[in-house]
Amino acid sequence: MIAWVGIGANLGDAHANVLDAIERLARMPGARLLQTSSLYRTAPIDSSGDDYVNAVAALDTELDAHALLQALFAIEQAHGRERPYRNAPRTLDLDLLLYGDQVIDNAPTLIVPHPRMHERAFVLAPLAEVVPDLVIPGRGAVRALLANVGDQGIAVLN
């Protein structure tokens, strides 16, 4: 199964945290890292704190969606991720964006496609970079959705 993971951080050395997360994804048992986007800088949305460093990664995984989510949480915990309140600044945030073309609604634990990914330039721009023809189930083509979030500031870092 091909899964797409959103990666973001805005506390501590956010750039290094994102790069370390990519390395950890590459070593994750039951998964193989296929590709990653460039890193992007974005202003917080519905949040506060410093700008975020964001990227996306594709994994070929034999893990089911729930096991993959738990593995992502473990990587966040290794970076000291705390969840004091919704949308708090974070040392590392890993979101399961897509799991193949499956639609999963086990709210509040797991919702795939990620419920707000189609509204976020920090997800859509990296996805459009690496897989421009991707279609988000129930939402549409990434390229078309990206046109709707043009007012959200985003810049490529590398």
Image: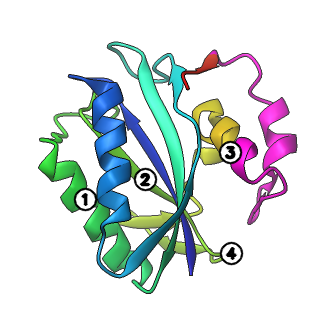
Residue pictured at 26% horizontal, 32% vertical: 90
Kind of residue at disc 3: His
Q: Which residues lie in the magenta part?
A: 127-153
Q: Earlier in the sequence, mark 3 or mark 4?
A: 4
Residue matched to label 4: 101
Residue matched to label 1: 73
Element under disc 2: strand
Give the spatial CA distance, label 3 vs label 4.
Answer: 15 Å
Q: Image check: 36 left or right of 76?
A: right
Give the spatial CA distance, label 3 vs label 1.
Answer: 22 Å
Q: Image check: 131 left or right of 141?
A: left
Give the spatial CA distance, label 3 vs label 2.
Answer: 13 Å
Residue pictured at 29% horizontal, 31% vertical: 16
Q: Are marks 3 and 2 in contact (CB under 8 Å)?
A: no
Give the spatial CA distance, label 4 vs label 1.
Answer: 22 Å
Residue matched to label 3: 118
Quadrant of the rendered structure where residue 37 is? top right
Q: Position of residue 64 (x, y in %)?
A: 42, 84
Q: Image check: 61 left or right of 143?
A: left
